[in-house]
Image (spheres, rainbow, N blue to C red):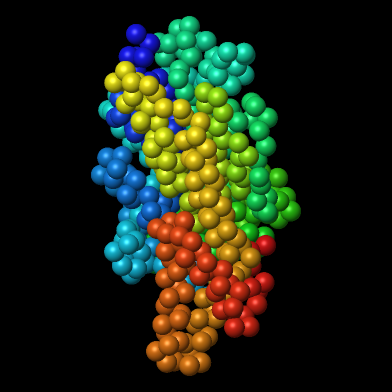
C-alpha cells in the first residue's frame, strides 16, 4: 500500500522558488504542501525581471496573470561616468525574448501561489518549525504541529524542500556554511508616486552613487527607487534606513530630479546577506531551492529568474520519482539527481556572480567606452562590427538568455583582458 501512496513533498517558503516548484510537482501528481506564513510584506526586492524568465513563466502558465499586474520592461540602461549603455531587448534577435516585466513582488507571489493551488497544491498558512532528524529520520524534519496541519500526522513527507529564501532556515539549522562573494553591501529602497519620468515606460535605470549604486524601476502606478551601499557609506549617511535612502537621493542629482515633488508611498525596505552559495544544498530527505541555495546580487536582477530555474532543475529530478510512486514501480534514488542539480545550480550562480563583478570592478563600462572610442576614432565597418558584437555578447549574458554559455563567457573574459584599449576600469568601478 505504501508504494501506491502519492509522493509527498513539503515545501517550506512561499516565494518564487517554493511556489513555482509546487506548480511543477503538483501538476505531475505529487501531494504537495506549501508551508508559507501569512506575514505581509509591503514591498520586496526582486521587482525587475529579466527576459530569460519569460519562458519559465509560460511553462508555469502564469505569464498572462503576471502581465496583468506588471509593467512591460523593454530594456535597461546603465549610466555613470559620462557613459550610457542601453540594452533594448528587441534589438538582439529571436534568441532573446524582446521584453520582461517589472512587478510588485507581493502581488507576483500571490499569482504564483494561486497557480500552485489551481494545480492541486495545498497551502498551510503557518510559520513552520524545522528540526534536526534523529536516527532513522530524514536529516531535517517538520515539527509535529505543521505535519498535523498538512494532514500528515505521525509521518514525515518523502521530501522537505528548504525554500526559505536568504533566511536559509534548514541549511542554517544544520550549520552548513556558504561561500561568500566579495561584496558586503546593504540595500534600502521604497516606492514613490508623482515622480518625473522621461524614459520609455518600464525602462529600468541603473546608476552609480557615492559608495555604491542605485536603481529606478518603473511599476504600473509608481516607481521603486533603491540604493545599494557599502557598509562604511551606509553608516556615514545615517542610522536608519530612511535617513540613508533620503541622504543618498539628495546627494545624487539624477535621483533627486526623478523624485522632485514625489511622495513616498511605502516604508523603506532593507536587504543584505547576499552574494553567497551554500556548500551543501541537499541531504537525506531534504533539498534547498532558490535563494536558500544561493543568491547572487540585486545588480542585473537575476534572483527571481534563478529561483524559477532552480525549481525547474529540481522538478526534472523529482518528477520521475513522483510518476514511479503513482505507478507502483520502484522509485529511483534521488541523491544522484540532487548531486547533478546542485552542480548545475552552482554553475548558474557562479556565472551570474562573475558577470556582476564585471560591473562592480568597472570592466563592463570600460569595454563600452573602449568600443565607443574605437568607432569614433576609426569609424569604419570593422570598428562598428567589433563594438556591436561586444555589446551583443554582454546583452545575451546580462539578460540571462545565454548566461550559462561557455562561449559567451569566454568571449567576455577575452574582451575584459584584451579589449579595453587603454581604458582604465577603476574609473568606472563601483565603490
Question: Going 47% across and 35% down the picture, which residue do you hit?
Answer: 337
* Lateral position of residue 326 relative to residue 210, left or right: left
Given residues 344 and 38, the one toward you in this image is 344
Residue 373 location, x and y as percent?
52, 85
Between residue 108 and residue 251, name the one nearer to us. Answer: 108
Residue at the (34%, 61%) spot, across then down: 96
Among the 4 quarters of the image, the one containing residue 95: bottom left
Q: Please tell me whether residue 307 is drawn above or below residue 244 in the rendered image.
A: above
Residue 314 visible, this angle: yes
Q: Position of residue 236 (x, y in %)?
A: 73, 53
Residue 309 against residue 99 in the figure, above or below: above
Quadrant into which the N terminus falls: top left
Does 68 sit left or right of 73 as displayed? left
Viewer-closest of 116 and 157: 157
> Height in image: 27 above or below 367?
above
Coordinates of residue 299 in the picture (x, y in percent): 53, 56
Q: For the point 50% across and 57% down, which residue is it?
A: 300
Quarter holding the C terminus is bottom right
> Image check: 245 left or right of 108?
right
Residue 421 position within the rendered picture, expressed as x and y whole percent measured from the top left: 59, 83
Amino acid at each position: 500500500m505504501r508504494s501506491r501512496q502519492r509522493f509527498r513533498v513539503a515545501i517550506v517558503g512561499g516565494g518564487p522558488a517554493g511556489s513555482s516548484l509546487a506548480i511543477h510537482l503538483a501538476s505531475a501528481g505529487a501531494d504537495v504542501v506549501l508551508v508559507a506564513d501569512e506575514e505581509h510584506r509591503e514591498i520586496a526586492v526582486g521587482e525587475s525581471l529579466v527576459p530569460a524568465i519569460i519562458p519559465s513563466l509560460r511553462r508555469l502558465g502564469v505569464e498572462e496573470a503576471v502581465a496583468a499586474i506588471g509593467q512591460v520592461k523593454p530594456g535597461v540602461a546603465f549610466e555613470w561616468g559620462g557613459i550610457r549603455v542601453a540594452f533594448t531587448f528587441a534589438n538582439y534577435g529571436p534568441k532573446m525574448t524582446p521584453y520582461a516585466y517589472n512587478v510588485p513582488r507581493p502581488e507576483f507571489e500571490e499569482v504564483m501561489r494561486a497557480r500552485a493551488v489551481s494545480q492541486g497544491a495545498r497551502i498551510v498558512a503557518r510559520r513552520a518549525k524545522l528540526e534536526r532528524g534523529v536516527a532513522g529520520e530524514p536529516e531535517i524534519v517538520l515539527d509535529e504541529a505543521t505535519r498535523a496541519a498538512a494532514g500528515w500526522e505521525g509521518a514525515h513527507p518523502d521530501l522537505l524542500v528548504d525554500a526559505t529564501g536568504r533566511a536559509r532556515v534548514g541549511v542554517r539549522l544544520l550549520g552548513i556554511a556558504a561561500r561568500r562573494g566579495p561584496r558586503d553591501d546593504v540595500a534600502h529602497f521604497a516606492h514613490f508616486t508623482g515622480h518625473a519620468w522621461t524614459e520609455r515606460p518600464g525602462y529600468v535605470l541603473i546608476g552609480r552613487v557615492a559608495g555604491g549604486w542605485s536603481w529606478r524601476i518603473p511599476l504600473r502606478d509608481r516607481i521603486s527607487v533603491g540604493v545599494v551601499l557599502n557598509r562604511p557609506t551606509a553608516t556615514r549617511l545615517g542610522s536608519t534606513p530612511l535617513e540613508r535612502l533620503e541622504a543618498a537621493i539628495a546627494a545624487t542629482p539624477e535621483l533627486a530630479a526623478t523624485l522632485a515633488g514625489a511622495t513616498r508611498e511605502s516604508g523603506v525596505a532593507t536587504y543584505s546577506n547576499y552574494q553567497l552559495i551554500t556548500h551543501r544544498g541537499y541531504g537525506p530527505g531534504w533539498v534547498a531551492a532558490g535563494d536558500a541555495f544561493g543568491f547572487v546580487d540585486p545588480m542585473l536582477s537575476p534572483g527571481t529568474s534563478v529561483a524559477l530555474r532552480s525549481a525547474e532543475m529540481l522538478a526534472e529530478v523529482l518528477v520521475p520519482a513522483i510518476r514511479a510512486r503513482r505507478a507502483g514501480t520502484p522509485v529511483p534514488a534521488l541523491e544522484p539527481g540532487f548531486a547533478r542539480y546542485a552542480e548545475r545550480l552552482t554553475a548558474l550562480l557562479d556565472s551570474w556572480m562573475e558577470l556582476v563583478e564585471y560591473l562592480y570592478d568597472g570592466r563592463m563600462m570600460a569595454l563600452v567606452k573602449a568600443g565607443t572610442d574605437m568607432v569614433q576614432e576609426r569609424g569604419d565597418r570593422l570598428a562598428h562590427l567589433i563594438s556591436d558584437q561586444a555589446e551583443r555578447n554582454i546583452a545575451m549574458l546580462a539578460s540571462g538568455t545565454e548566461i550559462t554559455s561557455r562561449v559567451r563567457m569566454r568571449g567576455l573574459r577575452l574582451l575584459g583582458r584584451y579589449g579595453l584599449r587603454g581604458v582604465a576600469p577603476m574609473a568606472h568601478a563601483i565603490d
